[in-house]
Amino acid sequence: DEPLERRLEQHVLRPIGMAGAVAAVTADDRDRDVRGHRPPRDAAVWDGQSEQVPAAFFPTCTADGAIAATPDDVATYLRFLLSHGADGVLGADDFTRLAGRHVDTGDGWYGYGLHTRVSAGRTTVGHSGGMVGMFADVCVDPAAGLGVGMMINGVGDVSAASSYLL
């Protein structure tokens, strides 16, 4: 009967080394979290120059996300991806399923948690996500041994930016 967020923290985040990450966005953590931003009107199309206003706080604990992490935790997660989970948290077969090519997304494949893309002969693996007014993306190029983690507290194509940087 252990809550999902505690199971994720104890069995995934802590063993990977993500000491500052939490698997729920709660009112208790509000003071430590960055405030998200969004366009001033719901119908507004953000053009990169438009004004943004603070987004409403949105507590959540869902199985499809709700992980709040520090930049250090994102770097730890990138190392985990680059090691193919070789730190004892996942076996080789488990990581293969996590990053497997199970569902064709049109611009790559989705496994059991990671998105794989091939562009200009390079294969990248990663995942993106967001909350109200915040977006993040992690992307690694295992062959090159490089990774990029991007987090923004506003509107923008963070996945395109991290792919470009990688």
Image: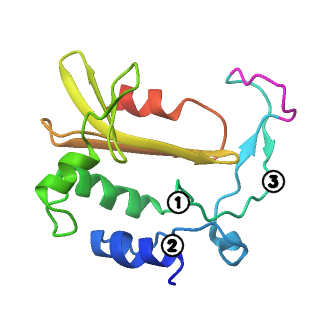
Kindly report which numbered mark, 2 or 3, lies closer to the viewer in this rendering: 2
Residue under numbered circle 1: 63
Against 6, is 90 above or below? Answer: above
Residue under numbered circle 2: 4
Residue at position x 70%, y 48% from top?
Answer: 132
Please provide percent x and percent y for residue 64.
52, 53
In the rendered structure, are the residues bearing label 2 and label 3 in contact, judged by CB atoms less than 8 Å apart? no
Q: Residues within 10 Å of mark 1 (few under 14, many from 20)?
A: few
Evaluate whether residue 55 shows in this view. yes
Residue at position x 82%, y 25% from top?
Answer: 44
Q: Residues within 10 Å of mark 2 (few under 14, many from 20)?
A: some
Q: Which numbered disc flags the more N-terminal residue, 1 or 3?
A: 3
The residue lying furthest to the front in this view is: 1
The residue lying furthest to the bottom in this view is: 1
Residue at position x 24%, y 56% from top?
Answer: 79
- Quarter where residue 35 is shown: bottom right
